[in-house]
Image: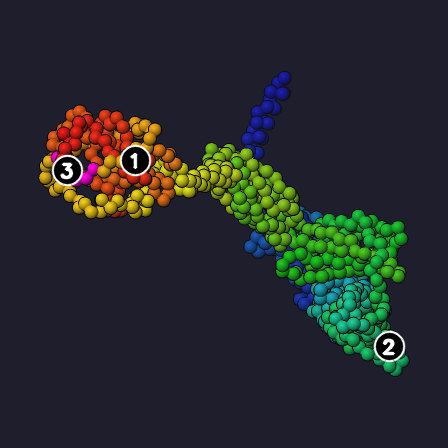
Amino acid sequence: MGRRGAGTPFLLRLSLLLLLRPGDPPAQPFNLSCVLNLSDYGLTCQWAQGADSHLPTSVTLKCARSRAQVVTGCTPQGGRSRCTVPRRLLQLYRQMEIWVSATNALGTAESEHLCLDPMDVAQLDPPALQSIQSIPFQTDCVALAWEVARSNAHMELQCELRYRRPEEPAWALVTGIVGQAGTTQCCGFLFGTQYHFQMRCRRSSARGYWSEWSPGRNYTTHEKAPAGKLDAWWSVRPAGSRGWLEVLLRWKAPGRREANGRVLGYRVTLSPRRRGRDPPTVCNTTHTQCNFSAPAGTRRVYLSAYNAAGESAPTEVVLLERKGQPLAGLRAVPGDERSLWVHWEAPPAPPAAYVLEWERVGSVPGRCCACWQMERGRAATAALIRDGIEPFQRYNISVYPLYPDTVGVPSHTAAYSKQRAPSYAPKLHLSSISKSDAELRWDPVPVEMQNGFITSYTIFWANSTAEVASAAVSPSRSSFVIRELKPSTLYKVHIMASTAAGGTNGTSLTLVTMVLDEAEIQFLFLTLGLVFVLLILLLICVQKNGRVKQQFWPSVPDPANSSLGKWVPAELQQEPLQVPGAREPGLATISTVTVLERAAGKQPSTRGREPAVEATGPFPALPRPYVRQEARGAPGRGWATAEHGEPVQYARVVGEGYRGQQHGPRPCAPQPLLPAPGPKPYQNLWFGGGCPEELPATFPLLQGLRLCGAEEIHDGRAF
């Protein structure tokens, strides 16, 4: 127990000392490496420092020759981790020991010791390429001449050569070149192709470092006539003139290995080339397609390419008919943003090859308006197309199977390499509207703006109370009818176009439903029009119907046209008409009384009598017509009839008005039988009072007059 207690203070003091000390021992340097520079034969070494010790630290590079004492090779300046050992401290072609030492107040740390021959780590100067040439002619080999730098002339070296075409990222490497200077020969180069060459060397002991690559040198190999067959595709249609065909021939440019240089052009002929004779050329172009006319029945054409070194062997193109069996199960899926994989099912009779055509859909054609490629191999069921493929663009793809004696009917599909939401949604137009329905129309989104396959159109509508509804519409439709709307209500409508990658909303359309339907409005106008027509017909009937007209507008006949008005007795013609003055008071004066005899057996009638008109003013009554209106065709009443069978006036009573109000019976005063000065308005006057009898019913002659309420007539006066 005592010993354990005595050790406790010592541990506490040691812990406090460790916590309160100002720094750490130096960290061990690492990753030491050295390079010998042959220009001054200085050995440059570099390393990596460890953690900071927070104390002043001295760093030196130590060297030890064989059987010699340790010396300080160099000391880095400015806190750097590199320094150079001068030539006088080095021992060339012998092993030396080199390391880094770091020392501070708390101790010393050393890196791993590096044992090396300074010449093994020498950095050589790069060699120089003198010349490059093709040898022999018409082969794919080149010869290169080179030499090393003067500083490396006393060394045995091994070198490497690398080359590549300008468009290639990777280099081709040639190893095993030994010697200080000389030539080397390499093969496998393409004809008529430019290459970039570089070279480097190191000591043949395979120790040390490679020199830097020499400055590059370009060289173009010699050309050779194009080789191989050209892949061709065609389409044939009748020409405008009879007996000729219009041929569109397309082909693929040969690859670098087949071109053997830069192709200057292509030639198309209708027959093969024979010894000493060149067939007529129907097309000579630098493009990869040609239109030309050929006689009907042409089944073969011949295509060749040429460069500065010569012309290739002709490729026979057989113009087969397109009537074979089409492919099944054609589909296309994205490869990446700029490629598409096309898949199909192998037919029962495998064709010799397949031709794939694709074309960008849109109003503005792309770089590849009608691209194509040929896939050879009977077992092929897929092909990757890259030429001209761009994201967010639709491509129509066709695949033709090529059989030995015919061409199959093409199969078609469409695809996008990548999709996104449409660039914009269509604009809505109101086609018709009623109180509960609204028909909307829109123009489809152009293909170049769809950015993918339109999966649906969605119609949204909302009223002022924020009641929102929607409906999905097939992409093949361009109209939609919204039903079950509220009458006389404002709605806001918009459309959203969607693809598999998203949707885009269009602008809003505001509409107001009607109060009545069109059919109801038509019915209302039809009803009002019918009522109006009925009123017009009623008025016309009233105007045309004499009986109705007589009830509302009685017809007053003209006495001048009556039979009585044209006949006046001789006695009345001789008697002058005496009419008292309008302002002379007095009794009526009767100048002549003609008695008309009533026919035997006829009783006077008292029906239809009207009261006499009384004078109510201070002036005497003016002459009034004595008219009796009776039903037409009533014989025995004693009235004269006009031309239309209506009763007319046949006598006038001219007399003085009574003075004052008359009471009791009054006389039915006769009037002179004179025609009325007219035309004047006529009134139906009835002789009122207590006339016991009417005038005679028959009146070919006036037979007599009776007085109502008078006893006698003396000298023309009634008493």
CA neighbours of label 1 inside 10 A, class few (<14), some (14 to 19), many (20+): many
Provide the secondary structure element on which disc 3 rests.
loop
Q: Which mark is residue 273?
A: 2
Q: Is there CB contact under 8 Å for labels 1 and 3?
A: no
Q: Which mark is residue 64?
A: none
Q: Pointer 1: what residue?
A: 628
Q: Pointer 3: what residue?
A: 589
Residue 14 lies within the magenta run: no
Q: Is residue 599 left or right of residue 497?
A: left
* Type of amino acid at the residue the image marks with label 3: Thr
Give the camera-side residue of 240 and 643.
Answer: 643
Give the camera-side residue of 269 and 147.
Answer: 269
Give the camera-side residue of 584 and 699.
Answer: 699
Image quarter (top left, top right, bottom left or bottom right) of the C terminus? top left
Q: Is there CB contact under 8 Å for labels 3 and 2?
A: no
Q: Position of residue 53 (x, y in %)?
A: 58, 43
Q: Earlier in the sequence, mark 2 or mark 1?
A: 2
Q: Is residue 88 left or right of residue 524?
A: right
Q: Which residues are magenta?
A: 587-593
How far is mark 3 from mark 2, CA to CA? 151 Å
Q: Earlier in the sequence, mark 3 or mark 2?
A: 2
Who's the residue at 65% across and 46% down the image? 476
Provide the secondary structure element on which disc 1 rests.
loop
**Residue 21 position by quadrant:** top right
Residue 590 lies within the magenta run: yes
How far is mark 2 from mark 1, CA to CA? 133 Å
Q: Earlier in the sequence, mark 1 or mark 3?
A: 3
